[in-house]
Image (spheres, rainbow, N blue to C red):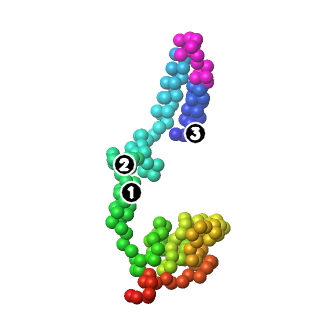
Amino acid sequence: MNHAQLTALGRALRLLGEHGDALGADTPDARLHEVRADLKRALDLLEEGVAAGAPSTRCPEHPYGPVDDSAPDLCLLCETRRRAARRAEFQGRPQGTGAPATAPSRYGVRGDRPQPQQRWLPEAWNGREWQLCGTPRRDRREAEAYLAAARRGSRPAMAYRLVHEFTDYEVLRIWGTPVRVDIEPMGNP
């Protein structure tokens, strides 16, 4: 829709709103015919302005994408992605070298993450490796505030660090001392 069409449609809809406010039990038929004509005019303006067809899915990311009737948003692309995630969760993701001593972080370890962008990554030491412990932040102060809150939390990690990620990784600051923890209690292989 261009600007003139949007303006005309807005005017027609405001006029319909005024008609709606004025309706009552004693509204004459002539007034109702006038409302009907204005309503038809607004529908015609809307019909002229809509260039594309109705979206085939309820997905905001792929409104005209392929349809999957079993998906809640009817989007085949998103449902395929969700199914792959559920399948990986069900089958268990292949672990990298050395399993973590604690339960794996829901944020993953650095090898699982996509290509770097300009952001700050809060990481925690889990006893064997650094793992992402929160959402990557675009603001350094916000990331430091997050780590400060995590250190004061009920179950703080042994150590935390803040990593600047931009084309490469650079460790900015480390809180605590990471100590390698052997998963065997007596050091047996």
The span picked out in magenta is 18-32
Q: Main secondary structure of the magenta part?
A: helix
Residue at image mark 1: 82
Crowding around mark 3 (Cα neighbors within 10 Å: few <14, some 14 to 19, many 20+) is: few
Q: Which residue type carries mark 2?
A: Ala
Task: Indicate yes or no whether the magenta region holds residue 81.
Answer: no
- Mark number, residue 71: 2
Crowding around mark 2 (Cα neighbors within 10 Å: few <14, some 14 to 19, many 20+) is: some
Up the image or down, 24 lies above or below 171; here it is: above
Q: Nearer the viewer, mark 2 or mark 3?
A: 2
Residue 80 in picture, x, y percent from top left: 35, 56
Q: Residue at x 58, y 18 (%)?
A: 23
The reply to whether discs 2 and 3 touch (Cβ–Cβ < 8 Å) is no
Between the C-alphas of marks 2 and 1, the distance is 10 Å
Residue at image mark 3: 3
Q: Secondary structure at mark 3?
A: helix
Q: Which residue type carries mark 3?
A: His
Q: Is residue 164 visible?
A: no
Q: Residue at x 51, y 76 (%)?
A: 126
Quadrant hosting residue 160: bottom right
